[in-house]
Amino acid sequence: MGRLQGKCVAITGASGGIGRETAIRAASEGARVVLLARSIDKLNELKEEISSQYQTEAFAFKLDVADTAKIKPVFAEAADIAGEIDVLVNNAGFGVFKEAHEAGLEEVKAMFDVNVLGLIACTQAVIPSMIRRKHGHIINIASQAGKIATPKSSVYSATKHAVLGYSNSLRLELMRNDVFVTTVNPGPIATNFFNIADESGTYVKNIQKFMLKPDYVAENIVSAMLTKKREINLPGWMNLGSLLYTLFPRTVEAVGKNAFFKK
């Protein structure tokens, strides 16, 4: 029996990218997967794929995490049908790469609604059950951008910095109840995230050879499920840059300024 055999894993933003790959990999390890996203058609396709290929169950629920009033009812329905959630992967998120003065307030609000408030609301929906059972794991997809901000990502970086701050406090709170909290801090990933974030395609072109594969990120996420892993930082060399930035911010900004303007 594997660590995830029979466990219930819920994933937001499961219709594509690392959310989709995480669902498939968790299912391959025997987990029951709860798929959450705005596109119910894509979720139903993934549900059928998982059900036909793996000896486990998959459940699809339409959810826009920006609509926080819908989150608790959807999670309650999911728990009634699929069982209480053992692992929550807060993966839903998006970014827009614009200089600070160019970002409209509606775009700013939309990013915070999804990346921060939606994540918090989903977490609040599962915390009581996890505390009661003294069992569970919350995995929040943050970003290396939350550790080291670069030009044209001021708002996106701010949302991911908020996720890191929230997660670090939450980890300490839930430690008393044997509930784990992990943050995932990847660099750029080859997904459709950049269809919105980088409309010109300039950034993707400049950093394409450094981009992570979604299945590789998903493999790391699933390997950490129901363990005390504090952070997953990918790739390692990029995380080294964020550590150096914490210690020597002025030097890193001076030396790396050309690289920072790849967007």
Image (spheres, helix red, strand yellow):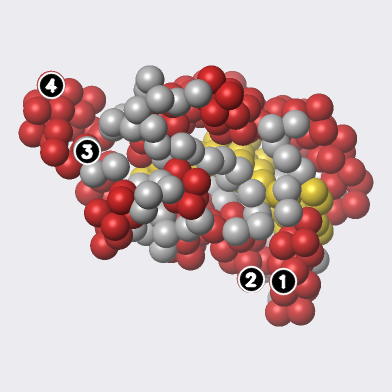
Q: Are marks 4 and 1 in contact (CB under 8 Å)?
A: no
Which residue is tagged 4?
250
> Viewer-nearest of labels 4 and 2?
4
Which residue is tagged 2?
28
What's under tag 2, amino acid-wise?
Ser
Q: Residue at x 34, y 32 (%)?
A: 152
What's under tag 3, amino acid-wise?
Phe
Q: Are marks 4 and 2 in contact (CB under 8 Å)?
A: no
Q: Position of residue 227 (x, y in %)?
A: 53, 47
> Viewer-nearest of labels 3 and 2?
3
> Viewer-nearest of labels 4 and 3?
3
Rendering quarter of residue 157: top left
User: Mark 4 or 1 closer to N-term?
Assistant: 1
Q: Position of residue 130 (x, y in %)?
A: 73, 35
Between residues 36 and 192, which one lies in front from this camera angle?
Answer: 192
User: Mark 3 or 1 closer to N-term?
Assistant: 1
Alpha-carbon span between mark 4 and mark 3? 16 Å
In the image: residue 39, left or right of residue 19: right
Q: Residue at x 81, y 40 (%)?
A: 75
